[in-house]
Image (cartoon, coloured by chain):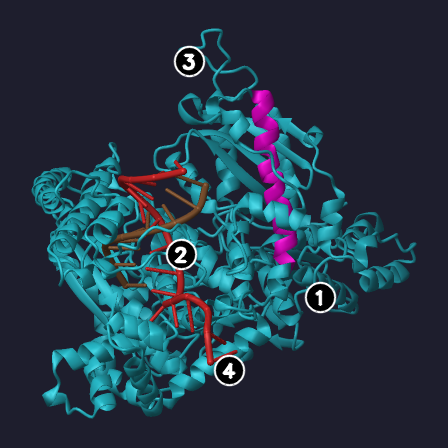
Chain colours: A cyan, B brown, C red
DNA sequence: GACATCACG
DNA sequence: GACGTACGTGATGTCC
């Protein structure tokens, strides 16, 4: 029945990816009415396919046709050159779930749909075009991709479907200056920034064509490069010959891709209404469905988009939470059914259950999945069997679990599949757990981070709070399952009939939140913030946290002993001064001694009635009595010992010998990170004694620590945002910014500047960032309030842009309920309109947030770009401390690392924001953090 | 668990 | 005109 492909046959090859991207970018972000699924690209894709099919009449109509797709991100070209297509931006989040739907669309139109793992669509197209040519037929490639132009000629043409323009040999010559057979030579020289093909630096298509036409082909050119007259060009070709040859191999299409089908399989088939109409109806494309139904003379199918005018949230809420929809996966067969469902949808909500809260030490206990509200499963893996022996428990595994290995082998391809979106709540945790078992989870969405991008400053972003607020549902609490205190058990000891509903519900909640947040992200105009500043942090931070930093236990231990001795000596002196023993660590007892017994002057703190004995109070009292100074010294040592030298030792991971902090991405309202368990963002540095604790943070043998920090980043951002020419100029000239401020304010020439005047100016500069007030500045500088107010007035006079910024920001916050960073991060200010002192707090926070937040955005951008920038260096990024990044690098490579990392940091705002002030980064290096900083 | 204190940017 | 204030975090110890 099928004729062998040959003379008189005409093959059409459609570049599927080109269709998808064109459709995606041509249309607004449409969503399916019934459930908010992004559908714009699929809609455009279907319209293009339909228009294409309609146009296939007349003598040029194809006899054979296929749509060719890319599959997998790793191809044989990545093996040749690992940076191939490395600068590609990640696929937009609302496009990803649409990719599988375009495959289904192609099949629904009854058109062959082909792809092959490890090959690009271009290679398949090349192979088929050559086969068609050899068989004596003709071929039209429907694409405008210049990478395909090497195939044109001898029966093969290209067609730009949008412009309806055919490209033949002359068309190729117009584009490249050479005919198709020499196109790869030109591309090899010119390179390609889109695919990250290096080429020869400084040579573009025009020069390349000139050279190839003069020397005949690339090999002759490279052989005879010495004859080139222009010295610079000659040198470039000689120096980069290998890179040019590599580039040619990258652009040269593989015309012998092994395929499991033949040209005959691609014969044009009539549309099948039984396939096409249900698909179009499912997508809810009313217009297109109607049009095609009319053309095919079939009945218009019913389109069920009833919740059309209701928000997706309402429909989601319609599905009640019910554990009847939760199942336990106990076999490979059951798991395969879930995996099939995941592939059908293209996304899945995932949650892990583990033996603890610390993702560095906890083990995976089970995995829950959810693909549809109300339908979720839990895959228990290492739950222990119940035991009659209450004391020791049982080491036997509970019944009804599939083997851990099998489950992970089955889940790994799904979790790593680039076409399957994995949705989680705080995915950094789950990603780290999976990383422990060799699974790299990607791509991901994170409902916690979506909420953070949309609701930053409004409320927390934990699952229980989000579920309560946005789903009206209180998830099952974990406490009754685990118990508390001494008798608490780990999740692997929880009986399965308790574990399944709890674990499955978490995945269910996550999926429902995602369905609601996804479209909301666009409405709140924070998709870009989420995609560029939040989501990419997950992988970056997971790697940093897993790397950890080496901390020397002996150093800490020695310091701890020294602190103990000094504290004991101080305690003796204190008891002598007071005349009896008491708890020095009790502010309550101390307050009574200082103010009641000894009669020093001080006031009560309103709330609890206790005296305030903070450092500022004691500092003032120190002039009148010896005791306060001793207390201050003791407190410093006590702090250093308990919080640092002692507690830090407990955080050294026994397996790695390193300390692994955890960063909260969605903790601080301004966009800053926060570090916990332990907090490595507040390791002492200001006091000499405390600073020595940094000596315990060391590089591994043969390595060194490198610290890079932004110089005055917040003041620079203030200079930009508030548009202060004097500040900008000072920064650009590399001046001492506080001295400059002092000189400007107090009319003191720079060469007569005193440290005291500079100190005051510095306090004012920082005060401005914090939303300055006369009272606050007065307290900080310990000067009368009137004097402080005078300073501020003078500051505003000299830098009027500051006052404008502060007033404008407050007004913006009042009007909108939020303020924004330069990168579009929104920080809500719900108290800005409050009455009373609350409003003052909110106003100052509103003034500070864009400055602190923009600085936080900048370093986030640097961190996100960092892995690619240092991929070739033996270096790891370990820590972030708001304006500083700490690396560990092989001895000898520190120079290269500093160059690479500094360049990323200094240009981190580009190209989204052009700062009027340059960002400067200081670098240091050494065997420990004290030296490196 | 609230509060006070103090470590950092 | 009084109010009562520097911005953002996390960990620890005391005390109830």
Residues A307 and A357: in front is A357
Residue hosting label 1: A48
Chain under callout 3: A
Left of A131 or right of it: where is A658?
left
Whichever of callouts 2 and 4 sits on the residue coming sooner in the sequence is 4
Chain under callout 2: A
Majority secondary structure of magenta residues: helix
Residue hosting label 2: A606
How far from the left and from the top, in percent, is residue A273? 84, 51
- The span from disc 3 to disc 2 (Cα, nearest Å) is 56 Å
Residues A660 and A207: in front is A660
Residue at 49% in and 52% down: A119
- The span from disc 2 to disc 4 (Cα, nearest Å) is 82 Å
How far from the left and from the top, in percent, is residue A169? 54, 76
Q: Residues within 10 Å of mark 1 (few under 14, many from 20)?
A: some
Is disc 1 in contact with disc 3, using a CB cutoff of under 8 Å?
no
Chain under callout 1: A
Tell me if residue A502 can be seen. yes
- The span from disc 2 to disc 1 (Cα, nearest Å) is 71 Å
Within the image, what quadrant is residue A852 found in? bottom left
Q: Residues within 10 Å of mark 2 (few under 14, many from 20)?
A: few
Same chain for labels 2 and 1? Say yes or no. Answer: yes
Image quadrant holding the C terminus of chain A, namely: bottom left
């Amino acid at each position: 029945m099928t004729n062998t492909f040959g003379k008189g046959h005409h093959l059409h090859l459609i570049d599927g990816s080109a269709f998808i991207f064109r459709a995606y970018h041509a249309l607004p972000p449409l969503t399916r009415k019934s459930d908010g699924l992004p559908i714009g690209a699929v809609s455009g894709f279907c319209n293009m396919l339909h228009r294409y099919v309609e146009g296939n009449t007349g003598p040029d109509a194809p006899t054979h046709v296929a749509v060719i797709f890319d599959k997998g991100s790793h191809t044989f070209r990545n093996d040749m050159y690992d940076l191939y297509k490395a600068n590609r931006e990640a696929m937009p989040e609302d496009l990803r779930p649409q990719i599988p739907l375009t495959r289904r669309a192609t099949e629904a139109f009854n058109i062959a749909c082909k792809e092959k793992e490890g090959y690009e669509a271009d290679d398949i197209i090349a192979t088929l075009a050559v086969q068609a040519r050899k068989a004596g037929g003709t071929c039209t490639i429907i694409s405008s991709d210049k990478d395909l132009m090497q195939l044109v000629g001898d029966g093969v043409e290209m067609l730009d479907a949008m412009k309806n323009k055919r490209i033949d040999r002359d068309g190729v010559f117009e584009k490249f200056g050479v005919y198709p057979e020499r196109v790869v030579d030109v591309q090899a020289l010119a390179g390609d920034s889109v695919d990250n093909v290096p080429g020869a630096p400084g040579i573009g298509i025009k020069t390349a064509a000139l050279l190839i036409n003069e020397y005949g082909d690339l090999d002759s050119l490279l052989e005879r490069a010495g004859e080139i007259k222009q010295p610079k060009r000659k040198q470039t070709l000689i120096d980069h010959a290998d890179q040019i040859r590599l580039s040619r191999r990258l652009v040269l299409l593989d015309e012998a891709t092994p395929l499991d089908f033949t040209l005959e399989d691609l014969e044009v088939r009539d549309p099948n209404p039984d396939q096409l109409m249900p698909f179009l109806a499912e997508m809810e494309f009313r217009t297109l469905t109607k049009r095609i139904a009319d053309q095919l003379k079939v009945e218009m199918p019913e389109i069920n988009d009833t919740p059309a005018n209701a928000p997706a949230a309402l429909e989601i809420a319609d599905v009640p939470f019910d554990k009847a929809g939760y199942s336990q996966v106990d076999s490979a067969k059951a798991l395969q059914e879930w995996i099939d469902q995941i592939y059908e949808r293209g996304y899945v909500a995932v949650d892990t259950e583990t033996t603890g809260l610390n993702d560095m030490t906890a083990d995976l206990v089970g995995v829950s999945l959810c693909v549809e509200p109300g339908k979720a499963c839990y895959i228990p893996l290492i739950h222990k069997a119940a035991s009659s022996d209450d004391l020791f428990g049982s080491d036997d595994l509970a019944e009804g679990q599939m083997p851990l290995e099998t489950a992970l082998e089955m889940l790994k391809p799904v979790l790593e599949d680039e076409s399957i979106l994995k949705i989680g709540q705080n995915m950094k945790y789950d990603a780290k757990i999976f990383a422990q078992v060799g699974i790299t989870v990607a791509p991901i969405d994170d409902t916690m981070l979506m909420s953070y991008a949309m609701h930053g400053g409004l409320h927390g972003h934990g699952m229980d709070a989000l579920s309560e607020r946005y789903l009206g549902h209180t998830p099952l609490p974990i406490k009754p399952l685990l118990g508390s205190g001494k008798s608490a058990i780990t999740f692997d000891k929880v009986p399965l009939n308790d574990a399944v509903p709890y674990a499955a519900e978490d995945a269910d909640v996550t999926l429902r939140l995602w369905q609601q947040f996804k479209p909301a992200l666009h409405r709140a105009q924070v998709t870009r913030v989420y995609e560029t500043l939040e989501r990419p942090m997950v992988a970056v931070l997971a790697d940093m946290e897993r790397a950890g930093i080496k901390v020397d236990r002996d150093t800490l231990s020695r310091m701890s002993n020294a602190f103990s001795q000094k504290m004991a000596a101080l305690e003796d002196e204190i008891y002598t001064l007071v005349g009896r023993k008491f708890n020095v660590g009790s502010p309550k007892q101390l307050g009574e001694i200082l103010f009641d017994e000894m009669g020093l002057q001080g006031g009560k703190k309103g709330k609890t009635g206790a005296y305030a004995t903070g450092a500022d109070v004691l500092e003032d009292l120190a002039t009148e009595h010896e005791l306060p100074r001793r207390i201050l010294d003791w407190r410093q040592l006590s702090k250093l010992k308990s919080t640092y030298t002692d507690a830090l030792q407990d955080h050294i991971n026994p397996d790695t010998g390193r300390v692994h902090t955890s960063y909260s991405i969605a903790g601080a309202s301004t966009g800053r990170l926060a570090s916990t368990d332990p907090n490595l963002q507040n390791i002492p540095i200001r006091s000499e004694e405390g600073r020595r604790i940094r000596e315990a943070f060391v590089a591994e043998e043969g390595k060194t620590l490198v610290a890079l920090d932004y110089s005055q980043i917040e003041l620079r951002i203030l200079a930009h945002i508030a548009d202060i020419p004097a500040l900008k100029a000072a920064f650009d000239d590399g001046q001492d910014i506080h001295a400059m401020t002092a000189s400007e304010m107090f009319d003191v020439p720079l060469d007569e500047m005193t440290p005291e005047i500079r100190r005051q100016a510095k306090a004012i500069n920082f005060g401005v960032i914090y939303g300055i007030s006369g009272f606050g500045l007065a307290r900080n500088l310990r000067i009368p309030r009137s004097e402080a107010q005078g300073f501020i007035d003078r500051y505003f006079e000299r830098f009027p842009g500051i006052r404008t910024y502060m007033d404008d920001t407050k007004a913006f916050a009042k009007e909108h309920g939020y303020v924004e960073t330069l990168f579009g991060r929104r920080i809500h200010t719900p108290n800005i309109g409050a009455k009373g002192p609350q409003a003052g707090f909110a106003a100052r926070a509103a003034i500070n947030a864009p400055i602190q937040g923009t600085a936080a955005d900048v370093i986030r951008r640097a961190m996100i770009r960092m892995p690619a920038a240092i991929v070739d260096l033996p270096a790891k990024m370990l820590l972030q401390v708001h304006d500083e990044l700490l690396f560990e690098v092989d001895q000898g490579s520190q120079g290269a690392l500093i160059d690479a990392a500094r360049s990323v940091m200094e240009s981190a705002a580009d190209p989204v924001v052009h700062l009027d002030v340059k960002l400067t980064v200081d670098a240091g290096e050494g065997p420990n953090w004290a030296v490196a900083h």
